[in-house]
Amino acid sequence: MTPNRAAEIYRQSFSDERRERLFLSSVSFFTTFAATRAITHAIRDGVGPFRNLTVGGRHFHHLVLGIAGLLGTGYLWLIEVNTAGKTSGTDDALAKFTSILYGGASALTLDEFALWLDLEDVYWTKQGRASVDAVVLFGGVLSIGLWGRPFFRDVFRELSHL
């Protein structure tokens, strides 16, 4: 399958803009969550170039970036021009960008959900950590499959004809 054919299938599968935005947000959520977990494990294990960030002697939680991303997304949605159902190239790009930003910011925020509940840094405790990770990752994959079903169906159909 050529990249042009894949792009054509994508456009056909996501002719509904809302479905595309939900799909992009789901993909962003899943990839951000997976990358965040990988990076935090690398930091904990002392692998690679990653290190904890501190600001003024305090640990900087990625929850802060998630909250800032959610606030930014909300603000962009408030000023978004595409409120009357008319789209321009700029409006469409902004809608896609905010969908991706929302998914990623949600993942960063929810990854530190235990911090919300206990109001202390319990990120590495064993209390439900494995089950929370599994549920979130499964939910991300399920959501990607739900919103992207027409796209994946057509891609697999195309690939089976090769």
Image (cartoon, grey):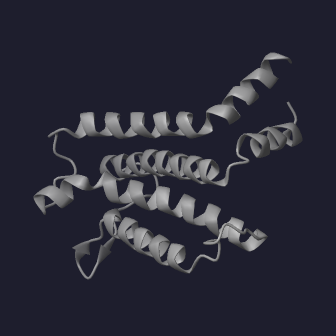
Q: Is residue 28 above or below residue 155?
A: below
Q: Is residue 60 above or below residue 22?
A: below
In the rendered image, residue 85, in percent from the top left (x then y), is placed at 67, 66
Residue 89 placement, left or right of 20: right
> From the image, which quarter does the C terminus lie in?
top right
In the rendered image, residue 111, in percent from the top left (x then y), is placed at 32, 52
In the rendered image, residue 155, in percent from the top left (x then y), is placed at 75, 29
Residue at 56% over, 80% down: 79
Count of number-bearing discs: 0
Q: Nearer the viewer, residue 36 or 55?
A: 36
Residue at 69% over, 71% down: 91
Residue 6 placement, left or right of 111: right
Residue at 51% over, 77% down: 78
Residue at 34% over, 59% down: 109
Residue 72 placement, left or right of 128: right
Q: Nearer the viewer, residue 149 or 50?
A: 149
Q: Give the quadrant of residue 135.
A: top left
In the rendered image, residue 53, in percent from the top left (x then y), is placed at 34, 69
Q: Is residue 15 above or below residue 162?
A: below
Q: Nearer the viewer, residue 46 or 67?
A: 67
> From the image, which quarter does the N terminus lie in?
top right
Residue 127 placement, left or right of 108: left
Residue that lies at the very extreme toward the front in this rendered image: 84
